[in-house]
Image (cartoon, rainbow, N blue to C red):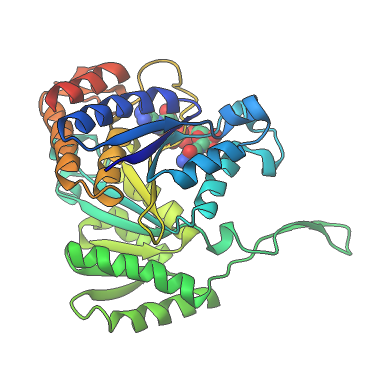
């Protein structure tokens, strides 16, 4: 059986970290006889430089044909002055909406070896294992109408629309309930139902869905409280489900609980389980080209890809075990460096994972 994985390195540290994940994927491909074929393409700023658009048609065509996509990151100061429609981020949003990647799965796991890297006390975070399920193709980031308009008073007004249809809420709800069933069977739905009508509907649909998943305990929390609880007592959560904007913010907050955003993978899936896999962090222009970026989030994204889109649980676990071994050996990139560790470069970290496989 042959499957295609499309590699989209993108910008900034993207090419450096994807190169390491590429090595690891090729090795397990061989070890486990996975029959993966690799392709690559340009997206984001790299695509703008080459063809004046962040998402060339060729890239979109390849993405549609692929079983899964591994993306580095897009964006950087070089393209910040471009009009909104031409910005690198549009390449990402275009891929998400064209492939209907509506479900974003972001685990926040604190590796015991890195407990001291968290800014919270070890007893508050050790053993942390949360899954945030974020709706990715709707909500205020996509709602119409949107723009900046001139009011009669002569003043300009910026505006966006926050809207969710019942079916959009239902399909993300199902992904979250199913994720909870496979984990600790607790789901917390985060909204702002005391202020926003769209999330009153969100809450109603989540309650309705709960009847189909009687083994899952459902709770609701306002987003402001959720932000607080995540730093106060994060271990109370198992799976969190929320809309696009709240999920964007809360998942970054949860990421920091684990000490480094450089450790966290993510998956974005559509209803056929085709997925785009990427680290939670951005293109880190401040460290691009220095060889110090942490490639582990991207390597762990490759493991998620094997699990969720390619159905290769054993190969996924092999990568995760190899990462854990490397941390046990005390190897650390600069972002997770702590006393007693040995600092390694991006490439050395990739090589160490390869050796541990
Ligand atoms: P960022 O995640 O790129 O960087 C935040 C901080 O974390 C920086 O100090 C950076 O050096 C550090 N960091 C990030 N990844 C790291 C890694 N793997 N190893 C070590 N350190 C790491 O966020 P930002 O600075 O807000 O954004 C930079 C650019 O990335 C912007 O153009 C932004 O639009 C873009 N961005 C892209 C994505 C994406 O492609 N999915 C996501 C977020 C931001």
Give x and y (percent) for residue 273: 35, 56
Q: Nearer the viewer, residue 303 or 161?
A: 303
Q: Is residue 276 left or right of residue 218?
A: right
In this view, which residue lies farthest toward the front? 1
Please give the name of the residue rendered at 56% of the width and 34% of the height, measured from the top-left corner: 44
Residue 264 image position (x, y, % from top left): 31, 41
Give the percent coordinates (x, y) of residue 72.
42, 33
Residue at 24% x, 21% y: name it.
Answer: 349
Looking at the image, can residue 192 be seen? no
The part of the image, by quadrant, that contains residue 355 is top left
Query: Which residue occupies the foreground of this view, 312 or 288?
Result: 312
- Taking the spot 28% from the left edge, 84% from the top edge, the residue there is 211
Q: Is residue 15 visible?
A: yes
Quarter of the picture for ligand 1? top left
Question: In the image, is residue 119 above or below residue 198?
Answer: above
| Residue 354 in picture, x, y percent from top left | 19, 23
- Horizontal arrangement in the rendering, residue 148 relative to residue 247 (left or right): right
């Amino acid at each position: 059986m042959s499957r295609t994985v499309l590699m989209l390195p993108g910008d900034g540290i993207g090419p450096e970290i994807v190169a390491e994940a590429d090595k690891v994927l090729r090795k397990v491909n061989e070890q486990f006889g996975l029959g993966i074929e690799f392709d690559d393409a340009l997206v984001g700023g790299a695509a703008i430089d080459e063809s004046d658009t962040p998402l060339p048609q060729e890239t979109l065509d390849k993405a549609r044909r692929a079983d899964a996509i591994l993306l580095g990151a897009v964006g950087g100061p070089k393209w910040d002055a471009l009009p909104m429609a031409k910005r690198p981020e549009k390449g990402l949003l275009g891929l998400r909406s064209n492939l209907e990647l509506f479900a974003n799965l972001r685990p926040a796991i604190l590796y015991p070896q890195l407990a001291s890297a968290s800014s919270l006390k070890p007893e508050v975070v050790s053993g942390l294992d949360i899954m945030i399920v974020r709706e990715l193709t709707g909500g205020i980031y996509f709602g119409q109408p949107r723009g900046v308009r001139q009011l009669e008073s002569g003043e300009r007004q910026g505006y966006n629309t926050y809207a969710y249809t019942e079916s959009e809420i239902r399909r993300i709800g199902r992904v979250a309930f199913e994720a909870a069933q496979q984990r600790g069977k607790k789901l917390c739905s985060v909204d702002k139902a005391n202020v926003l009508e769209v999330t009153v509907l969100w809450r109603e649909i989540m309650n309705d869905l709960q009847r189909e998943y009687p083994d899952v305990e459902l709770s609701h929390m306002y987003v402001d409280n959720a932000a607080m609880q995540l730093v106060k007592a994060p271990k109370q959560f198992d799976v969190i489900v929320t809309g696009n904007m709240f999920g964007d913010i809360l998942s970054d907050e949860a990421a920091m609980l684990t000490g480094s955003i450089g450790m966290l993978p993510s998956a974005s899936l559509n209803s056929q389980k085709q997925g785009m896999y990427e680290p939670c962090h951005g293109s880190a222009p401040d460290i691009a080209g220095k060889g110090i970026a942490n490639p582990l989030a991207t390597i762990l994204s490759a493991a998620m890809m094997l699990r969720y889109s390619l159905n290769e649980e054993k190969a996924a676990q092999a990568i995760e075990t190899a990462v854990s071994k490397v941390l046990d050996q005390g190897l650390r990139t600069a972002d997770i460096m702590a006393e007693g560790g040995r600092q390694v470069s991006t490439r050395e970290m990739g090589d160490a994972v390869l050796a541990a496989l």
